[in-house]
Image: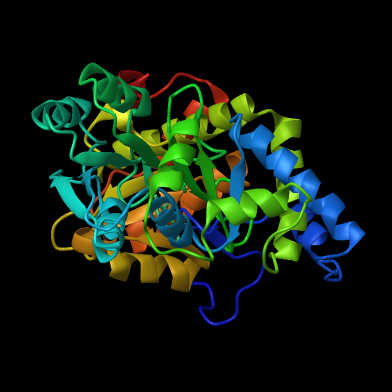
Amino acid sequence: MPNTTIHTGRHFLQIPGPTNVPDRVLRAIDMPTIDHRGPEFAQLGHEVIDATRKAFRPKKPVIIYSSSGTGAWEAAMVNTLSPGDKVLMAETGQFSTLWRALVQKMKVEVDFLPGDWKRGADANQIEEKLREDKDHKIKGVMVVHSETSTGAVTDIPAVRKAIDNAKHPALLFVDTISGLASIEYEHDKWGVDVTIAGSQKGLMLPPGLGFNAISDKALAAHKASSAIRSYWDWGDIVEANKSGSWPYTPATNLLYGLKEAIAMLNEEGLDNVFARHKRHGEAARAALAHWGLQNQCADPKAYSPILTAIVMPDGHDADQFRKVVLDNFDMSLGAGLGKIKGKVFRVGHIGHFNDLMLMGALSGVEMALDLAKVPHRSGGVVAAMEVLTGRGATQASRAVA
Ligand SMILES: *Cc1c(COP(=O)(O)O)cnc(C)c1O
């Protein structure tokens, strides 16, 4: 039995965000802080603004905030809506639930389409609601692309189609905080009006940067909105960005990191990044199916490439299990959030990640299932290896493919 107080080797951070930061990014951040109004900063400012636009692939500006993802949620709201407005949101899990609470605090009314936390948002339900809204009271449709609490991905083009089918003018807001740079995503092509993202998940940075990608329609809504805002105002930031600066002190060192992280993503190629995450998701699910445990996401079409949320069998507590994993193997797994706390644990396979890191994570889980006497069929790690080496997918992963 390993010593549980002294750990050797690297800690395994397998939560679905914050994710592991590559050494290259850490080295890039490890710089003296510079004058954010000097010429050296302006060059960095222009470089990251350009690079970020290439990574998000939109035509319009991407706003970079010194904030968590939650700040970028708030920014999206206060720039486009006004108190008293109404929006339609889909309950996909804990993050959609938190987002709803934030929107309500801004005095915007939320029509919350109920969900069972086992799948993505239902585009048909959204279309139906929008068709009923003859007076166009609904100003925005808000969906979480990658619901990090359940491991379910929402089909954003289907949501766009639902809005178009209903011929409804509502803005489309998408939270892809854990999807950006890890799951296929197209801000312009998919007709998203405001995309909300953060630094500490697929982008492989420490926490501290939030993003809003916006459309022309969102910019027009910005001009019309009467919400009180200052720090979050897109207008001031877009203006300052023209000279490579921000209206206030930006997170200089994180911007060094952002430049390096985007360079790494470009070297690999975004499409390869997406394919890598998909393959790791498939391998993780092969282990899960072999163990005989259940996936929190019940819709194979919505299975997440970036995390696997595993349901604990009755009589076993997920947080107790995570403690066994941490104490014995120095690995952090994601907790069940909100109403599935203690019932689910999450294995992150997102960001700076490779085959052996996945095998290490899955081995830790399988060894801990043994130690914690959680009923399972051993050999899940072998099933995952077979997916990675291409020696025939397991029954479960074949059903998915
Ligand atoms: C992490 C996450 C958030 C919250 O981001 P913070 O940086 O913690 O504010 C919101 N939505 C989703 C989908 C997330 O994964």
Q: Residue furthest right?
A: 39
Question: Quadrant of the rendered structure where residue 191 is?
Answer: top left
Q: Residue 22 at what x, y percent from top left?
A: 70, 53
Q: Residue 124 at what x, y percent from top left?
A: 17, 25
Quadrant in the picture for the C terminus: top left
Closer-to-camera residue (140/267): 140
Q: Residue 100 at what x, y percent from top left?
A: 25, 56
Question: Quadrant of the rendered structure where residue 226 is?
Answer: bottom left
With respect to residue 369, does 48 lie above or below?
above
Q: Is residue 240 left or right of residue 187?
A: right
With respect to residue 257, does 117 lie above or below?
above
Q: Is residue 41 left or right of residue 157?
A: right
Q: Quadrant of ligand 1?
A: bottom left
Can residue 382 be seen from the camera position used here? no
| Residue drawn where x is 68% and y is 33% of the image | 54
Closer-to-camera residue (158/304): 158
Can residue 226 be seen from the camera position used here? yes
Tell me the colour scheme of the image. rainbow
Picture mark count: 0
| Residue drawn where x is 36% and y is 23% of the image | 157
With respect to residue 267, does 336 lie above or below?
below
Closer-to-camera residue (168/298): 168
Q: Residue furthest bottom?
A: 5
Q: Is residue 22 left or right of residue 385?
A: right
Q: Residue 72 at what x, y percent from top left?
A: 47, 55
